[in-house]
Image (tube, rainbow, N blue to C red):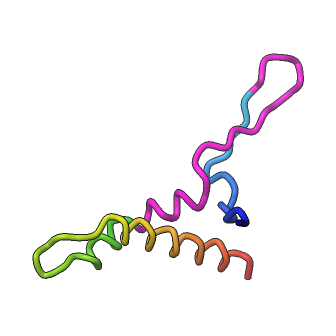
Amino acid sequence: MSEKNDGGPAFPFSHDDHDGHGNTLCDGMSLRDYFAAQSIHPMIQQSRGDDGAWDPVAVAVGCYVLADAMIEARKQ
């Protein structure tokens, strides 16, 4: 199984690694995770049934499908 392109770090930053080798890049949250997190509220609103319930697994999968599409769109 191939790894998903996570888009790299969403908020990369550098810090001095204090061992004399210069700066180290710290990744933090991936861009894929950031995109998925930004879409969770609208996905929940769209997936609510007549009884107000929603399927958390379907929402989570949908968020990452959308995030993957956004990462692909950035290549164009």
Q: Quadrant of the C terminus?
A: bottom right
Q: Is residue 37 shown in magenta?
A: yes
- Which residue is located at x 59 percent, y 72 percent? 68
Residue 14 percent location from the top left of the image: 73, 36
Q: Residue furthest top?
A: 19
In the image, is residue 40 above or below residue 75? above
Q: Tell me which corner region of the image, top left, top right, bottom left or bottom right, holds residue 19.
A: top right
Asked if residue 57 lies left or right of residue 35, the reply is left
Q: Residue furthest right?
A: 21
Viewer-closest of 24 and 54? 54
In the image, is residue 24 above or below residue 8? above
Residue 40 percent location from the top left of the image: 38, 65
Q: Quadrant of the N terminus?
A: bottom right
- Which residue is located at x 75 percent, y 39 percent? 25
Asked if residue 22 lies left or right of residue 5, the reply is right
Asked if residue 34 lies left or right of residue 62, the reply is right
- Which residue is located at x 54 percent, y 57 percent? 33
Q: Is residue 28 shown in magenta?
A: yes
Viewer-closest of 46 and 53? 53
In the image, is residue 62 above or below residue 13? below
Residue 58 percent location from the top left of the image: 37, 72
- Which residue is located at x 65 percent, y 60 percent? 6
Image: magenta residue range:
16-39
